[in-house]
Amino acid sequence: MSQAPERLAQDKAMLEQLAKNTNDPASVSLLAALEFRANALAAVEPLRERLNEITLDALKTAWEQPSQLERLAFFRGLAEGLSKPCLPSRGTDATPIYQRLWIHRREIEKLKSVPELHAFLLSTGLSENVLGRPDAHGRFKRLEKVCERLELSLGKPGRPTTAE
């Protein structure tokens, strides 16, 4: 897909501006997400091309079936399948949390507690509605559950040392 030169110039200017703001967590988050997306698209392209080849080969093979009944059955099934709504997205309302945890895994490794993680994720643009608010005891139950699912432990293991 080609883009107009004006659009490419705008995109380049935006990326340069983002690169200048390396102290801004939102800019760092966006740059990391863009890099991840670009790498993912580059990795998927050969697979997409191969899927197209396989699909065209299957359609050609079906079209060349000697039995008209088999050919009709295949294309009826294909038409029926294509007429159905797409599969539902597998994303949940926690998906943005998992995405940020993946994109910022290097920074998150340095955090020492769930409240620190909560503050960091807020700085990357996630909202309190997505992250969950602290309960009456100041605990972030939703983030604790996400960390538990990922087996993500923050800080050093064991009891904190006491000052003497």
Image (cartoon, rainbow, N blue to C red):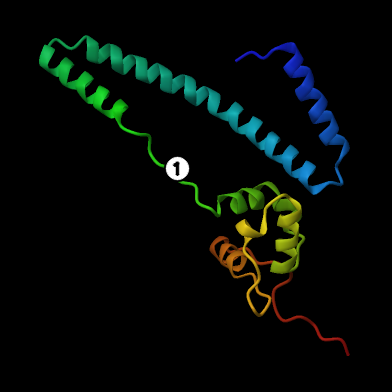
Quick check: 146 left or right of 117?
left
* Residue drawn where x is 58% and y is 29% of the image: 43
Question: Please, which residue is most extreme toward the bottom here?
Answer: 164
* Residue drawn where x is 45% and y is 42% of the image: 89
Tell me residue 35's x, y (percent). Answer: 70, 34
Does residue 35 lie above or below 13 as drawn? below
Q: Quadrant of residue 41?
A: top right
Quick check: 119 left or right of 43?
right
Total label count? 1
Does residue 140 lie above or below 3 as drawn? below
User: What is the three-letter code of the residue carrying label 1?
Assistant: Ser
Does residue 103 lie above or below 11 as drawn? below
Q: Quadrant of residue 162?
A: bottom right
Tell me residue 46's x, y (percent). Answer: 52, 23
Does residue 81 lie above or below 63 as drawn? below
Q: Residues within 10 Å of mark 1 (few under 14, many from 20)?
A: few
Badge 1 element: loop
Looking at the rendered image, the quarter that the N terminus falls into is top right
Q: Which residue is identified by label 1?
A: 89
Tell me residue 147's x, y (percent). Answer: 60, 64
Looking at the rendered image, the quarter that the C terminus falls into is bottom right
Quick check: 19 left or right of 31?
right
Q: 126 and 49: which one is in front?
A: 126
* Residue drawn where x is 48% and y is 23% of the image: 48
* Residue drawn where x is 16% and y is 21% of the image: 73
